[in-house]
Amino acid sequence: MADTYSTYYHSPVGLLKISGTEDFISEVTFHDTSQKPEGKKKHFPPMLINCVEQLIQYFNGQRRVFELPLHQQGTPFQQGVWNELVLIPFGRTISYLDLARKTGDSKATRAVANANGRNNIAIIVPCHRVIGSNRELTGYAGGLWRKKWLLDHEAKVAYGVQTLF
């Protein structure tokens, strides 16, 4: 089993924990700043450094697509949902119903929402781009304020508008 490494990045939407191996990224999660981050390791594989650099570019409006090998554990259904998430264009949104249709079952909206919520690679696997059918912001593991911030950031970079919501 490959060694897993973690680092932290202070982003505009709070502290992000980034984990992975020499070969892939397995986690980008929001980290509660009241918790003390684990001790720092002296060695960070280039994969983690590259991930932080790409996140910085994203937040600076210089990157719309991430180019990183990803790996997260999940059922085949969850994997299918996560694969669809990365296909949602930067600055665009889709509904949970539309996402369910893309996975092949329009009746699987709740299952899609559940899989979306289990995504462990925030921002890079853009679960924040999924909204309610009524165009309302709904559930986000990082909090709705972060979801709104990310969508507004993408709208500003992609279309020059201040906000979509």
Image: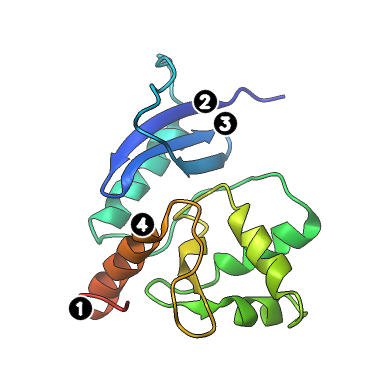
Would you place residue 80 above or below residue 54 in this image? below
Q: Nearer the viewer, residue 15 or 53?
A: 15
> Few, some or many C-alpha atoms within 10 Å of disc 2 (few <14, some 14-19, many ≥20)?
some
The mark nearer the N terminus, 2 or 3, is: 2
Where disc 4 sits, the SS reads: helix
Residue sitting at x 65%, y 45%: 72
Q: Nearest to the eye among marks 1 and 4: give it.
A: 4
Q: Reading the chain from its start, which is encountered first: label 4 or label 3?
A: 3
Other residues around mark 1 within 10 Å, as few (<14) / some (14–19) / many (≥20): few
Q: Amino acid at mark 4?
A: Arg
Image quadrant where residue 99 sits: bottom right
User: Do residues under tags 1 and 2 come within 8 Å of each other at their CB atoms?
Assistant: no
Residue occupying the point 50% across, 74% down: 131
Identify the residue position indicated by label 2 in the image.
5
- Precedes in sequence: disc 1 or disc 2: 2
User: Which amino acid, mark 1?
Assistant: Gly
| Res 117 quadrant in image | bottom right
Does the residue at mark 2 contact the one at mark 3 (Cβ under 8 Å)? yes
| Residue for badge 1 | 160
- Placement of the N terminus among the 4 image quadrants: top right
Q: CA distance from mark 2 to mark 4?
A: 25 Å
Q: Secondary structure at mark 2?
A: strand
Q: What percent of the width, then of the height, locates residue 18? A: 46, 36
Nearer to us of marks 1 and 3 is 1
- Which numbered mark, 4 or 3, is in the foreground of this view? 4
